[in-house]
Structures are given as structure tokens and as C-alpha cells.
């Protein structure tokens, strides 16, 4: 059985920055997954965070300030008060506990973790979610999908590749992804 250890600060930073294009990552602020501890100072225009602990696969993300506000308010149980579209990158993809419950830490009984490939996410101000009407909700299709957020407008997820593929469109074990272990942030 593989030994699980807490990633180092450097590993967390590297994991977090892998979520966004290099031209964004190189200047982003990096927060730990607690959304408070600063791992690296940078521009306030982008906040990158490493994969949260307890997930069976990688899922770092980089958020603009609007998405960060949206996320903070959702986590506090508040209705988000954003006044514009928020943008987030998850170029490694994610492994989530429950597609229908954004805050779930474990899959519901009888279900497994779901996987989504590399993507961008967009959150919307209150009252504008109707613009997403007719867009599906299948994270495995490779096509854009809508994800529900309790107490908020749904988010739009735009895949860049299918689950199991990298942002470059190949499998995660391809030459351009050498050295990246999709299942273990500490190995990144």
C-alpha cells in the first residue's frame, strides 16, 4: 500500500499552478486549500490552490477574484453576491464526490467519485442562470455542461479534454505529461 504524506509547500505550489495556463500561473497568488494560508505571493488577479486533501485524484484550480468571492460565499452557506461572470481554470481536471452536491466531501452511499477532464468553469450572478437552459449535465461527454450549486446559479463547465486526457488532448501518461501522477499531488 502506498504511503500517504502531506505534500511539501513546494509540491503544493507546483500542483496549484498546474491548474492554469503558464502565462496566468507565473504571476498568480497561491493559497493553500484552506483558502487562507498564502503559499506564494503574487498578483491578486488570479488565485491558485492545490488539490484539496482527501481526494483520490488531482484537482487544483485557479480562480479570478469573482470566482473566489462566489466560492467563499457558497462555502459560507450564503447566496453569492457577485455582479459579473467569474472564471476558473482546472486544467488537470478533477475528481469530485457528488456531481449534485458541490460541497460533498465523500460520494453518496452506493456511488463512486466522478471524474471530469481538464476544463474551465464560469459562475454567474443571481438571476442569470437561465441563460444555461438546454445545456446538458454530463461531465464525461467532453461537451460543455451545467453543474448545479445549491443556493446559487449553476456553473457552466467547458471541457478542454475528456476525463483521462490531459489539456494537450492526449492521455495523462503521454510524453508531455511525464512525471505527473494524476492520482497523487505529492508526486507532482
Image (cartoon, grey):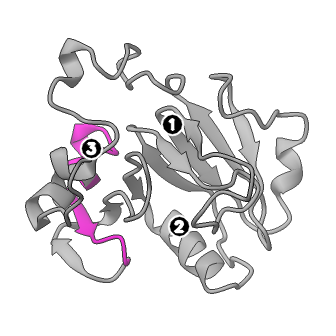
Q: Residue 42: give x, y in percent of width and height.
A: 18, 67
Quadrant for the C terminus in the image: top left
Q: Residue at x 28, y 72 (%)?
A: 32
Which residue position is annotated with label 2? Answer: 66
Above or below, 153 against 87 in this view is: below
Which residue position is annotated with label 3? Answer: 18
* Closer to the camera in the image, 65 or 57: 57
**66 in the magenta segment:** no
Density class for disc 1 (Cα within 10 Å; few <14, some 14-19, many ≥20) is many
Q: Is 153 left or right of 112, judged from the image as shown?
A: right
Q: Residue at x 40, y 53 (%)?
A: 61
Q: Which residues are magenta?
A: 16-34
Label 2: element kind: helix
* Closer to the camera in the image, 73 or 170: 170
Q: Residue 5: give x, y in percent of width and height.
A: 19, 63
Q: Residue at x 24, y 66 (%)?
A: 29
Distance in Å between CA atoms under marks 2 and 3: 20 Å
Which residue position is annotated with label 1? Answer: 119
Amino acid at each position: 500500500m502506498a504511503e500517504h504524506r502531506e505534500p511539501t509547500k513546494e509540491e503544493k505550489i507546483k500542483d496549484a499552478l498546474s491548474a492554469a495556463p503558464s502565462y496566468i500561473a507565473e504571476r498568480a497568488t497561491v493559497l493553500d486549500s484552506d483558502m487562507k494560508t498564502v503559499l506564494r505571493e503574487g498578483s491578486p488577479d488570479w488565485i491558485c490552490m492545490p488539490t484539496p486533501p482527501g481526494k483520490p485524484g488531482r484537482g487544483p484550480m485557479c480562480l479570478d477574484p469573482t470566482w473566489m468571492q462566489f466560492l467563499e460565499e457558497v462555502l459560507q452557506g450564503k447566496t453569492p453576491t457577485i455582479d459579473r461572470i467569474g472564471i476558473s481554470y482546472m486544467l488537470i481536471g478533477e475528481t469530485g464526490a457528488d456531481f449534485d452536491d458541490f460541497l460533498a466531501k465523500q460520494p453518496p452511499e452506493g456511488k463512486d467519485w466522478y471524474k471530469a477532464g481538464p476544463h474551465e468553469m464560469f459562475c454567474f450572478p443571481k438571476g442569470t442562470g437561465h441563460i444555461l437552459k438546454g445545456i446538458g449535465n454530463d461531465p464525461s461527454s467532453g461537451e460543455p455542461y451545467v453543474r448545479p450549486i445549491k443556493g446559487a446559479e449553476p456553473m457552466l463547465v467547458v471541457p478542454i479534454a475528456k476525463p483521462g486526457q490531459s489539456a494537450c488532448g492526449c492521455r495523462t501518461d503521454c510524453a508531455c505529461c511525464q512525471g505527473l501522477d494524476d492520482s497523487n499531488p505529492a508526486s507532482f
